[in-house]
Image: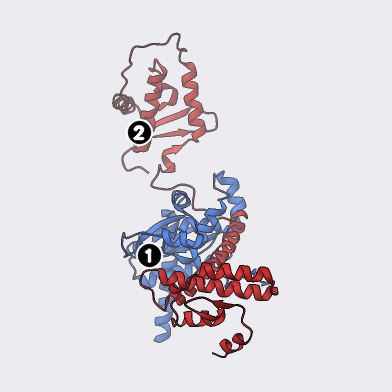
Chain colours: A blue, B red
Amino acid sequence: MIDTAVAGTVDQVGDLASSLEAVLFTLNRPVTVLELRDILQAPLSQVEMAAAALAERLSGRGLLLQRHQDQLQLVTDPSQADVVRRVLRPEFPSRLSPAAYETLAIIAYRQPLTRARIEEIRGVNCEAVLESLEEKDLITETGRLEAPGTPRLFGTTIKFLQILGLSSLEELPPLPEAPAASGSTTS
Amino acid sequence: MTADIELEQNPVYLVRSPAFDGPIELLLSLAQRAEVDLKAIQLATLTDDYLRAIERERPPLDRLAAFLVIGARLVQIKAAGLMPQPSSTEEDDLEAWEEAIKGRLAEYKRFKELAESLMRRHATGRFSFAGLFEPEVIPQARVQVSLDALAAAFQQVLDRLPPPEQIAFEMEHISLADKLEELRRLLSGQAETSFTAVFSRARTRLEAVVIFLALLELIRIGEISVVQGSPFAEIKVRARAPQEE
């Protein structure tokens, strides 16, 4: 009895993963797990399991399931960037300023954080670079700090994952320890 | 403090002042323990005396350095004492501040390296792309013509119009709403018409432009669609039944 119950759950998750794939393909934008719960009419825990199953199924394929906070999006795998670019003719920003990469790195690893904290680390005013990153949809306001003036808190967006071809923030290289050794792993 | 005793046997400098008489090392250790009032000692005078002393006989470099370090600590302690609410933790605060600066520099260095790795990764161009058409913009089904073809067709319409012979100062009043209605009437009589026929009644460039805007608006709100059967074929304008997608 237990075996069939487990098998049934696995099937359900598999079906749900297929539905999830179809929905993400059609909507073609970041979709939150809450939205997916309503669309798929399944509890959040099952949506999460389906997402994990779909991500696994897509490995080695041309598509990638991207995850940022509570958002999911179906995108092309970074390994296919060249061929996709041939059909897209897009005007993607292929380079940002050094200040922009620095600010992005700080936000990516320390999010959510305030502009004051970013400026403390970089030691310079960051208003313009934050504005430009926000305009490019690479960062966004994720909330307000409960402190005098309720300053804005910044975090990265799912677009940030896309310009780096990451499936999630967890794929970022680990934060190096104090005087960092250059990470060259041979695996 | 054993260090005090050792140093006293061969002091870096012997301070001679009304408030304190003795090795400068002792002065520092007393000041650190707040057992001597530095406000009563003029550090400028002390420094001047020292400079005169070393002019007469130059001590080895390590002794000069030692005086500098001790002198700097004394200045630091005295300055801290002059600040409001002096406390014995001021010294610790300074050290903490120093640590914080060092930590911040190390932190910045780490992020700078990460920024470089992000830049390298970005430069490889291995992006992931979202699908091409966003459904909340114009669905593809409504525009089966490339934008280039649409623009080229419109240019041909403009080229066919007589060139403006003189600059007219008379204001033309052509409303978008009127043109929208005209287009709707045109397409209610027939299911399909050609792109050029839509502009057949345009007399001026302004009128053609407004008709074109009306056409785009009707595409946007989903009342019509434009279709090109094959490359370079005449573009057809069709009325769309409601809810047809």
Q: Position of residue B91 (x, y in %)?
A: 46, 76
Front residue of B35 and A130: B35
In the displayed structure, B233 sits above or below B39; it is: above
Query: Quadrant where the C terminus of chain B lies?
Result: top left
Q: Position of residue B46 (x, y in %)?
A: 54, 71
Q: Position of residue B68 (x, y in %)?
A: 60, 71
- Who's the residue at 60% across and 77% down the image? B13
- Return the chain for callout 2: B
Tell me which amino acid carries mark 2. Answer: Leu
**Residue B238 visible at all:** yes
Query: Quadrant where the N terminus of chain B lies?
Result: bottom right
In the displayed structure, B232 sits above or below A55; it is: above
Instruction: Report how far apart the C-alphas of labels 2 and 1 lie in the structure.
Output: 35 Å
Q: Residues within 10 Å of mark 1 (few under 14, many from 20)?
A: many
Residue A60 lies left or right of residue A186; in this view the side is: left
Residue B195 lies left or right of residue B12; in this view the side is: left
Q: Residues within 10 Å of mark 2 (few under 14, many from 20)?
A: some
Tell me which amino acid carries mark 1. Answer: Val
According to the picture, the residue beneath numbered tag 2 turns out to be: B218
According to the picture, the residue beneath numbered tag 1 turns out to be: A33
Element at badge 2? Answer: helix
Q: Position of residue B232 (x, y in %)?
A: 54, 29
